[in-house]
Image (cartoon, coloured by chain):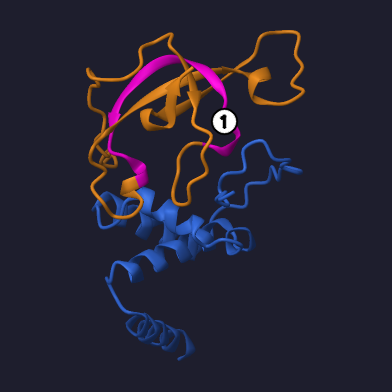
Chain colours: A blue, B orange
């Protein structure tokens, strides 16, 4: 049976963490980018959901914002908005800013 | 300035297969891909509670297509004891799930 990792209705949920952990700075930035991409129709919310489901086992190993951000990266690569090497180059640039 | 609201994708659904009160059964199928019908409700029988309208098909939108033809979305009411094995309650409890027409067949 092909059951996607988000489709868990009816399964034992375990204890619920009632603490509001707030949002880290990068989480707010990632969320803003995600909202901008959907409101400008660069990607569809349905595509982002599908990309998250395609993370498979990683879906559960990642935190909420890690999961949605990784799905967003995979989708933008799939759509060819940038290449993997362009992304890596940019990451190095940004990392350099913090190192200095 | 308030955030710009995303316009609804709702359109009316004058042509449709089911009407309010019709008994329906959710298809018991498990195709791969992005599906919006939860696994726990597949194969269960319920009743059309309302017609929500026609919407672009999310199963197509999920792969970058335009979602046409649009699909009729219904809210379907199920008895909890028809959904969960061993469900016990002194009252008659229901669960309502929004399901697209292509996932429903007459019961």
Q: Which residue is found at the position 68% from the left and 46% from the top? A: A19
Q: Which residues are magenta?
A: B38-59
- Quadrant position of the C terminus of chain A in the picture: bottom left
Residue B38 rendering spot, x and y as whole percentages: 54, 37
Q: Which residue is found at the position 76% from the left and 44% from the top? A: A14
**Rendered image quadrant of residue A30:** bottom left
State left or right for residue B78 relative to residue B103.
right
**Rendered image quadrant of residue B4:** top left
Residue B1 rendering spot, x and y as whole percentages: 25, 42
State left or right for residue B101 relative to residue B39.
left
- Above or below residue A86? Residue A8 is above
**B107 and A41: which one is in front?**
B107
Q: Which residue is found at the position 32% from the left and 51% from the top? A: A44
The chain containing the residue under callout 1 comes to B
Circle 1 sits in a helix, a strand or a loop, which is it? Answer: helix
- Mark 1: few/some/many CA within 10 Å (<14, 14-19, 20+): many
Residue A63 rendering spot, x and y as whole percentages: 59, 60
Q: Which residue is mark 1?
A: B41
Is B20 in the magenta? no
């Amino acid at each position: 049976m092909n059951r996607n990792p988000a489709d868990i209705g009816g399964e034992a949920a375990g204890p619920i963490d009632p603490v509001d952990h707030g949002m880290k700075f990068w989480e707010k930035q990632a969320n803003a980018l995600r909202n901008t991409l959907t409101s400008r129709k660069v990607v569809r919310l349905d595509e982002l959901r599908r990309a998250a489901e395609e993370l498979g086992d990683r879906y559960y190993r990642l935190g909420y914002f890690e999961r949605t951000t990784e799905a967003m990266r995979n989708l933008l690569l799939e759509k060819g908005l940038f290449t993997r090497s362009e992304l890596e180059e940019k990451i190095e640039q940004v990392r350099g800013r913090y190192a200095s | 300035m308030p955030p710009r609201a995303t316009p609804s994708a709702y359109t009316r659904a004058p042509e449709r297969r089911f009407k309010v009160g019709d008994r329906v059964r959710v298809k018991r199928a498990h195709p791969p891909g992005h599906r919006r019908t939860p696994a726990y409700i597949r194969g269960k029988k319920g009743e059309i509670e309302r017609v929500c309208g026609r919407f672009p098909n999310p199963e197509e939108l999920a792969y970058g297509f335009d979602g046409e033809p649009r699909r009729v979305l219904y809210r379907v009411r199920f008895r909890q004891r028809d959904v969960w094995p061993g469900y016990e309650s002194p009252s008659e409890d229901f669960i309502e799930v929004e399901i697209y027409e292509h996932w429903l067949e007459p019961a």
